[in-house]
Image (tube, rainbow, N blue to C red):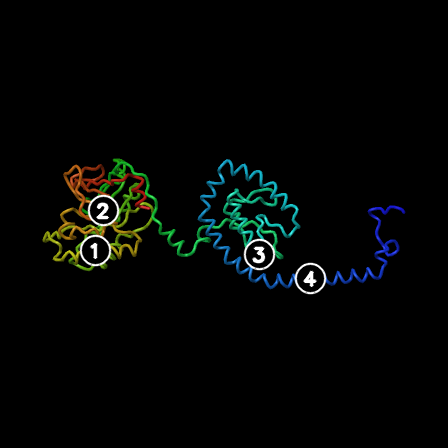
Amino acid sequence: MKPETPDEPRTPENDDHAASPKHAATDRGWHATAQRADEALRAGVDRVRPVTDRVGQWLAPVLQRLVQWLSPLFERIGRAPAVRRFRERVAPHVAAIQDKLPEGSRSRSMQVGAGVAAVGVVGLIIGGVATSGGEQTSYEEAAMAAPMKSAQHAAPEQPDAPKTPAETNSPAENKAEAEKPEAPAPLGPPVEGIDVSNHNGPIDWKQVAASGKKFTFVLASDGIDFTSPTYDEQYHGAKDAGLIAGAYHFARPGDSSGVDQANRFLDVADYKNDGKTLPPVLDLEVDPNSGGCYGMSVEQMHKWTDEFNNTVEERTGQKPIIYANPSFWSQCMGSTDAYSDHALWLASYEVDSPSVPSGFGDWNFWQYTDKGSVPGISGSTDLNQFKQGQARLEQLAS
């Protein structure tokens, strides 16, 4: 019998099996059975697919949050020498398996079905799942890029653009992130500054800056009806010379409400969050006429101060700095600690170390004399220190 060559086609003439009617009928029966089984399988997949898709849609954000929470740990694990060596050994094998998959069923992170989510998380631990080109995805990319697709309709996935926190976080989380307090700048040596009013007249701010002064407070308004005629010139002159500047209001609680005085003050001050402006200042002192608390009780003083502070914060987003001395705070404010979250500008003269009023943890600014001499200013002026250094002064103004 002549051996059959591998490439010789079988025909009814040379193939007894093909020529047999019995075998032909059997083949047709098996073909029909296979076709029915295939149709049943497809119908089953179609019925199951909506369920798997819903499960995938539910699991995807959960996995994203899990990866976001665990990614710092995985990053540290991934940098371990043993993990790197393991990843280097595994990656070629994963890539080889992917290369053998039919085109259209590959996915750079093997992202098919809910089971792939587990592969993605494990991929984080071993340092990333190999891509079809032999590259490795990042830790976060490997697990976050696991959409729950039907296995029958899986298609090559295009690389996703990196997601920002605003895209991955909920609105509540984004708001919390925006409101998160800024980390304090490093402490430094005290910074020297001054405060001025219309009584100081014209000022050569370049000379003030050259003398080493880094900040100033400028009187903007007093009570309900006085505006300093030199405010604009002094305030903007200081900023133009490179000083950090802030506006202050001399409070007269007996004249009008805290809301009215705060609004008038801010209209004059023209506060701007420009990185060169200190928070607005509420100057609380005894009544210049009577020496008392403006005929108000401690509770009434608290209410007036709250009105002023709340109005300032609503309009500027800043808690006002509070200027006061220990005797006023005890006499008129009852040594309250209700304002301990405000920066304190403390007035205390002729002492080496000022006494901090009860209710505050420490002072931020200290007005230590009203008889200072500064180049560029005629006559005496108030001298101040900011306790925590230049970096924190700039941070307070940002």
Pointers 3 and 2 in contact (C-beta within 8 Å): no
Dot 1 or dot 3: first in sequence order is 3
Q: Give the amino acid at mark 1.
A: Thr
Q: Residue at x 13, y 56 (%)?
A: 294
Query: Pointer 2 and pointer 1: residues touching (CB < 8 Å)?
Result: no
Residue 349 relative to residue 155: left or right: left
SS for callout 3: loop
How much space separates mark 2 and mark 4, taking CA atoms?
82 Å
- Residue plotted at (50% across, 35% down): 81
**Closer to us: 227 or 261:** 261
Secondary structure, mark 1, is helix
| Label 2: element kind | strand
Discs 4, 1 touching: Cβ within 8 Å: no
Sequence-wise, the earlier of marks 2 and 4 is 4
| Badge 4 density bin: few <14, some 14–19, many ≥20, Cα 10 Å | few
Separation of disc 3 and disc 2 at Cα? Answer: 59 Å
Q: Which of marks 1 and 3 is in front?
A: 3
Q: Tell us which disc is closer to us: 4 or 1.
A: 4
Which residue, given by chain and number where applicable, does mark 3 sit on? 149
Reading the image, the residue beneath label 2 is 344
Q: What residue type is labelled 2?
A: Leu
Q: Which mark is residue 37?
A: 4
Asked which quadrant contains residue 191, the reply is: top left
Left or right: where does residue 395 sit relative to residue 292?
A: right
Q: State left or right for residue 247 relative to residue 85.
A: left
The amino acid pointed to by label 3 is Lys
Tell me: residue 181, above or below residue 56. Answer: above
Q: Which residue is drawn at 60% across and 44% down?
A: 94
Residue 7 seen by the camera: yes
